[in-house]
Amino acid sequence: IKKVSVIIPIYNTKEFLPECLNSVINQTYPNLEILLINDGSDKPCRKVIMEYAKKDDRISVIHSTERKGVGAARNAGMDTATGDYVYFLDSDDYLPLTTIQLLTESIGQYSMLSGSVKKITFKVEADLPERTHKVLENRNKDRLFRNNSVLNRLISLHFIHSHNLRFNEEVECYSDISFLIPAMIYLDRCPYLTDCLYYKRVRNDPITNPALSQLERDKKVGDFLRIYNDMKDCYGNHAAASNFLDQQFLNYYRRSIIMLLADRKQVEQTFNKASISAKKVNPRSMKKLNILVKAEVDQLKKERKAIFSGLIKLHHFLYNAAGAIRSKRKIFLILYRSLFIRLPLKEKTVVFESFLGKNYSDSPKYIYEEMLKSKKGYKFVWIFNEKRKIPGNARQVKRFSLAYYYYLATSKYWVSNSRLPMHLDKRPGNIYLQTWHGTPLKRLVFDMNDVYSANPDYKKHFYKQSRRWDYLIAANQYSSEIFRSAFKYEKEMLEFGYPRNDILHDADREEKAQQVKLQLGLPLDKKVILYAPTWRDDDYYQSGKYKFQLRLDLEEMKQRLGDEYVILLRMHYFIADNIDTAGAEGFAYNFSKHNDIAELYLISDLLITDYSSVFFDYANLQRPILFYTYDLEKYRDTLRGFYIDMEKEVPGPLLRDSSEVISSIENIDIVKKQYKENYGRFYDKYCSWENGNATQRVIERVFK
Ligand code: C2G
């Protein structure tokens, strides 16, 4: 029975390693030699490596004290391998359990057999439904090697040694090409096994710990050109390989190099290197190019930088224009970049946005209303998705309209409680007050595990967007510390409490509450329960539109509590589902669309929530809070992770089902007593900065 040497280079991937190594150890094909090449990883990662080395005696480890790169690590693996075949695996990826068996059973006399590489962002189970697997021999070589990757290929070690196949050690990216080109030349036949998978993880933290494919584009382009030049020098007279390399170069030129050159500075830096490569491209390979690209490559060959640079400008202009024809927003963006952003900055204009234009609420609302009162000659603009009735004379603009771009380009001040889109530029003189929208319980951005995410660009975008913030508000010491790490925020922190919570400390808050109750048409003789849960990362229709299933039995609640209480249902602004209150009329009211949750806090006598930051704010009122955490384990352990131990710290009971919730309300006085001490501690830690002056202090600091 043939032995397979699995070669796994490892550099700081401790959070992915267990999944990777478990998938190897548990392969149905047993005769493995597992070579872990530690490429200068840090201590925590080394620890995981050593734990696994102890677990399975098929594992051996080669350590390098410095990072030499994936090429050197794989070469070291091949030098020590003793198997009949070699199989390369990356330490952040993993395999279905039958992959190596399938390849080994089907390879026969071939020197290399390839499967396919599937990119994944969410967890995929390691075992697959039964499938039939066929070896296809008629695949053309180009198609098989176009991904420039050695992954998911079973390769004869004898073949590797007899042709001295190696990885280039001078580059960080694309070293696979240096292995694959000679392999392609010497292989007579390149079979492909259908439905034989390898899972390639799309990682989501290119800021703290980038995968090779996530390095900066100029670095990647440099490496690519270097490898291309090398390979053309070595194998240029082999017609098929040379043609293949040219196609790779031209594709890469169109996909990546052009994009890099959108930045004018890069033309200077890249021109000479690109020109050396372009000269190596065989004119025959350029026949099918479109005229513009052909002209660009020709100018590169002739080393005419000025003309080349003009063509690149034209290329980007046409590209943007083509985009503009397809979408109105693109036209606005062109105007934004070429015109609006050059107009003078309006020193006394302030743009406000709350929850992505969904409502008039949160700290931006309170800052705005306070500024309205102080009449210092400011002009105000609010961003909304639809027209709203609001006090004052603010100009309302629709999100992503022409006016939106105009005001964001020309207003000195931006006040927002969440992120503004990536495609906006911050110009010199602009001041951006980020109010944020809650004390964190759920782990945020860079404190979230770099494991699965619906959007692999989330952390990267967050990082870029948050570099624009000049001030960030923290409601307590705890938030202030977390924001520094979770957002990698380094500028000024306004440690004043939340403007949105001033109202909770107002002397006339009882009168205000009466007014709100009247406005909302609620009975004045009933006490009010507020139910305000958060959203679940894994339960959605599409990005930004989440599902929610109400797990409170409203009919029973009405029966048992209806004489004394009414309940207000308030869903998170991400929830797209409409909550059904049928059968509980006159008792349950849906205020999910109500602008400002602070007004609902004011009128309620007790709060039911789950993992939402609402409880940190509500605690300012020192009224009872119940935690309806029917999915605590899942939320805490698999979705997000928490900063605090809910079971120990929160100021109320964690409840599991609707009837527990009801009986806690029936016995609310006992609950209050039980949690008195917890509540006191909680209040001191999270609410002690809040005393009704936050808005005033923020305005004094930011609008100097
Ligand atoms: N909110 C609301 N109604 C709900 C839930 C939340 O109006 N049913 C508002 C509250 O102002 C709350 C804010 O939205 O403080 C944030 O909601 P969270 O449930 O905490 O969730 P999220 O939007 O993920 O923000 O640092 C805070 C975190 O970023 C959480």
Image: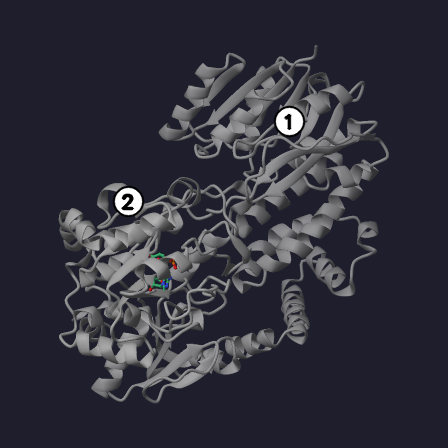
Residue 613 in picture, x, y percent from top left = 31, 57
Earlier sequence position, callout 1 versus callout 2:
1
Can you identify the residue that label 1 sits on? 166
Which amino acid, mark 1? Arg
Q: Residue 646 shows which numbered tag?
A: 2
Residue occupying image coordinates x 59% and y 60%: 261
Can the viewer see residue 374 in this picture? yes
Mark 2 element type: helix
Depth check: give the residue in front, 307 or 536. 536
Depth check: give the residue in front, 474 or 624. 624
Mark 1 element type: loop
Quadrant in the picture for the N terminus: top right
Residue occupying image coordinates x 22% and y 54%: 668
Left or right: 247 as drawn, with respect to 562: right
Q: Using the image, determine if residue 443 lies above or below residue 60.
A: below
The image quarter containing residue 291 is bottom right
Name the outermost residue toward the top. 1
- How dense is the environment of label 2, judged by Cα within 10 Å: few (below 14), some, or many (20 and up)? some
Which amino acid, mark 2? Met
Quadrant in the picture for the C terminus: bottom left
Alpha carbon separation for disc pair 1 and 2: 53 Å
Can the viewer see residue 471 in this picture? no
